[in-house]
Image (cartoon, coloured by chain):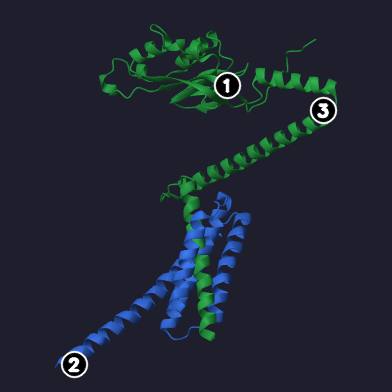
Amino acid sequence: MIFIAIILGCILGAILGINAPMISYTYSSYLAIAVVAALDTVFGGIASVVNKKFDIKIFISGFFGNAILAILLTMLGEKLNVDIYLAAIVVFVGRMFVNLGIIRRYYVEKWTSKFSKKKEKSK
Amino acid sequence: MNKLKVSIVLGIMCFVLTYGIFLQIKTVENSNMEVSQNYEENNLRAEVLKFKEKYDNKAKDLEKLEKDLEEERKEATQDNTELENEEIQIKKANKIIGLSEVTGPGVIVTLQDSEMNPSNALNISDLLVHDLDVLNVINELKNAGAEAISINGQRLVSTTAISCEGNVININKVKVGAPFEIKAIGLPESLSALERPGGYLPFLEKYSIKTSLEKSNQLTIPKYSGKLEFSYGKSK
């Protein structure tokens, strides 16, 4: 059920995104930072599933809240002539790597434990 | 029930995410932007793109306003014969001085730089289309009775100057590069005399410059987009 919903959402988003009218270049930097923020939340969500601490409310609020906050900060940075979006990218991408590391460790451990169990059985 | 809710929420989020990603990809692709690793270069490119967008928006606004103005004028002069005559005169004058779009039969001449290997040429400069070549072609077209001429979308008006600007040429103070597509409205048969033996196009072809002349029954020549203003000449 969940997988079907995810795949359906992805396909619909891709089709609509390809056919949507092009946004003005001025706003594309905001969209980029929002996409990065949302991606960060997705990886964070997967990592929390792995850690068994997943909470849908936190996930949703993080998804939209982070994206909006990132856009607002980018706007503020533009007004102040400081490239705040750089800091946002560093934080988001850094967190993405941390979360990816957690996910990777979890699956590697799972696999190795599986293999060792098999070996014990064959012995 | 809870699972249904969760899956709906996740579906919506995936939708938003992929939508954003694809929209962004499309925008970046359409703006012909090559993302380079050079920070400074990217910034400059973004600035240029932003300004270009602003310019395009303003041009679109201007076009719309001009259309509005025309409609207003049409409405205002509808039931008044005297004003209608004036309106017709304005239209005629605009056509002649190049402030309105013109359609009609004519020819399309294209001039393209030679594709010969430069090391085989005696004089590399002969392989390029120069401002003087364009000028000569236009002169011959006018001589053959061309009524309206445009070069790569730049309408020729009474104040048009054609000058050399390095590897491009300046027409109406706008930089225009090869290949040059010269559209001329007039009698196609007489305009195509440009191709006659001893004419200017065969002369250019001797220097291996690629030329072509195409007759057309339905040509559209855009209007002059700049401003025509006289500050010295006074009329009585």
Quadrant the C terminus of chain A occupies: bottom left
Task: Name the residue type under label 1.
Answer: Gly
Residue A72: give x, y in percent of width and height: 61, 63
- The residue indicated by pointer 3 is B77
Labels 3 and 2 in the same subunit? no
Query: What's the CA distance linking mark 3 and mark 2?
Result: 98 Å
B137 w.r.t. A113: above or below: above
Q: Is residue B227 left or right of residue A85?
A: right
Whether residue A46 can be seen here: yes
What shade has chain A been given? Answer: blue
Labels 1 and 2 in the same subunit? no
B88 w.r.t. B35: above or below: above
Q: Which mark is residue B69?
A: none
Task: Name the residue type under label 2.
Answer: Glu
- The residue indicated by pointer 2 is A120
Labels 1 and 3 in the same subunit? yes
Task: Name the residue type under label 3.
Answer: Thr
Q: Is residue B82 left or right of residue A43?
A: right
B210 w.r.t. B36: above or below: above
Residue B212 is drawn in which quadrant? top left
Label 2 CA crowd tier, 10 Å (few <14, some 14–19, many 20+): few
Q: Which mark is residue B104?
A: 1
